[in-house]
Image (spheres, helix red, strand yellow):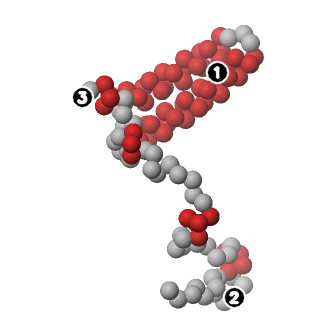
Amino acid sequence: MGAVDMLGPDSRLLTALLIAVSAALLVAAARLRPLAARIACGGLSILVAMTSGIAAVNFYYGYYSTWGSCGPTSTVATSATWASCPQRPCRPPARASSGGSPCPARPAG
């Protein structure tokens, strides 16, 4: 097990380091005097804590085992990807009870 494997996206060491950094930032936010530094440390601590939560979920479920596999799935959905989605809701359920089919007929094809 090399140094690269120790800090992979599914490693316990990475999760522990992120939690330690978040705790250190909280301590810094409590001890620093300038308000701007306190706000910056608090905000960074929240960001790092959220990232450690993502790392913990990835460790538990094993979504990504390499850093290269993390990139392709982190794309933003565009209107073109939503348009190709086969199961789109047609209209809200409240209007669907007014009689008839809740969805217009889909073109064949």
Query: Which of pointers 2 and 3 lies earlier in the amino acid sequence?
Result: 3
The x and y percentages for residue 18 are 48, 27
As drawn, the label of residue 99 is 2
Residue 9 versus residue 109: which sits nearer the camera? 109
Residue 9 versus residue 62: which sits nearer the camera? 9
Instruction: Decide if residue 37 is in sight here.
Output: yes
Q: Give the residue displayed 71% in from the left and 22% down from the top.
A: 39
Q: Give the residue displayed 51% in from the left and 21% down from the top.
A: 21
The x and y percentages for residue 53 are 49, 36
Instruction: Select label 1 or label 2 by which is in front.
Output: 1
Q: Give the residue displayed 55% in from the left and 64% down from the top.
A: 81
Q: Is residue 88 left or right of residue 12?
A: right
Instruction: Decide if residue 59 is in sight here.
Output: no
Q: Are marks 3 and 1 in contact (CB under 8 Å)?
A: no
Residue at which label 1 appears: 41
Q: Say if 7 sits above or below 64 in the image.
A: above
Q: Quadrant of residue 36?
A: top right
Residue at which label 3 appears: 1
Q: For the residue marked with disc 2, what is the amino acid?
A: Gly
Q: In the displayed image of the protein, which residue is found farthest to the right?
A: 35
Residue 91 versus residue 8: which sits nearer the camera? 8
Q: Is residue 69 left or right of residue 22?
A: left
Q: Are marks 1 and 2 in contact (CB under 8 Å)?
A: no
Q: For the residue marked with disc 1, what is the amino acid?
A: Cys
Q: What's the distance in space between the residues labelled 3 and 1, CA to CA? A: 34 Å
Q: Is residue 53 left or right of residue 88?
A: left
Q: Give the residue displayed 68% in from the left and 80% down from the top.
A: 96
Q: For the residue marked with disc 3, what is the amino acid?
A: Met
Q: Say if 92 sits above or below 20 in the image.
A: below
Instruction: Select label 3 or label 1 by which is in front.
Output: 3
